[in-house]
Image (cartoon, rainbow, N blue to C red):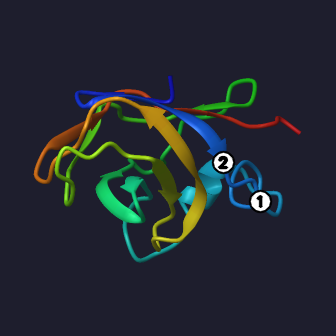
């Protein structure tokens, strides 16, 4: 499971390979922790190009990789939904500290989100090649 929380469980189905894993030789964690505008990167759950909720990561976002697997630090993390009316997210974006998308793709799952809901991120892992 990629994301689990009070509003359901979502799994990553596809990803934008131009923006995920290692880009220009940098691992995902380095990309998320880049930038200076905010103090941390974030995960956005989206439907129809509209952010339903944005959950801020800790700094750093992930712990050390183990066999190519990154695990989010500090979970559970939460965010307050800014949009939605019983809306199920269809996409996700991982963003750096300057709100630049470093990974994106589609998600599948259950559990609608409504504006002002508290959405909890109880686990998040990312697998990328070790070489």
Residue at the location (63% across, 56% down)? 30
Indicate the position of residue 22 as horizontal and vertical percent values.
Answer: 77, 52
Q: Which residue is mark 1?
A: 23
Indicate the position of residue 95 as horizontal and vertical percent values.
Answer: 49, 61
- Residue 112 located left or right of residue 85: right
Q: Is residue 9 above or below residue 115?
A: above
Of the pair 105 and 40, the residue shown nearer to us: 105
Q: Is residue 93 above or below residue 100?
A: above
Indicate the position of residue 53 as horizontal and vertical percent values.
Answer: 28, 53
Mark 1 closeness class: few <14, some 14–19, many ≥20 residues within 10 Å? some
Residue at the location (48% across, 50% down)? 91
Mark 1 or 2: the one toward you? 2
Q: Which residue is mark 2?
A: 15
Q: Which element type, helix, strand or loop, lies under badge 1?
A: loop
In contact (CB < 8 Å): disc 1 and disc 2: no
Disc tally is: 2
Residue at the location (45% across, 71% down)? 99
Indicate the position of residue 14 as horizontal and vertical percent values.
Answer: 65, 42
- Residue 10 located left or right of residue 86: right
Q: Which element type, helix, strand or loop, lies under badge 2?
A: strand
Of the pair 80 and 98, the residue shown nearer to us: 80
Q: Is residue 118 above or below residue 56?
A: above
Residue at the location (83% across, 35% down)? 130
Alpha carbons under labels 1 and 2: distance apart: 13 Å
Residue lying at the far bottom of the rendered structure: 37
Residue lying at the far left of the rendered structure: 116
Of the pair 61 and 45, the residue shown nearer to us: 45
Mark 2 closeness class: few <14, some 14–19, many ≥20 residues within 10 Å? some
Of the pair 73 and 15, the residue shown nearer to us: 15
Which quadrant is the C terminus positioned in? top right
- Sequence-wise, which precedes: disc 1 or disc 2? 2
Q: Which mark is residue 58?
A: none
């Amino acid at each position: 499971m990629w994301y689990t929380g009070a509003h359901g469980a979502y799994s990553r189905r596809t990803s934008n390979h131009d923006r995920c894993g290692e880009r220009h030789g940098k691992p995902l964690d380095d990309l998320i922790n880049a930038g200076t505008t905010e103090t941390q990167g974030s995960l956005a759950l989206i439907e129809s190009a509209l952010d339903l909720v944005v959950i801020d990561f800790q700094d750093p976002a992930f712990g050390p990789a183990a066999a190519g697997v990154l695990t989010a630090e500090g979970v559970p993390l939460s965010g307050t939904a800014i949009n939605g009316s019983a809306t199920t997210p269809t996409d996700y974006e991982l963003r750096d500290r300057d709100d630049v998308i470093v990974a994106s793709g589609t998600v599948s799952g259950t559990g609608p989100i409504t504006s002002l809901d508290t959405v909890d991120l109880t686990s998040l892992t990312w697998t990328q090649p070790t070489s």
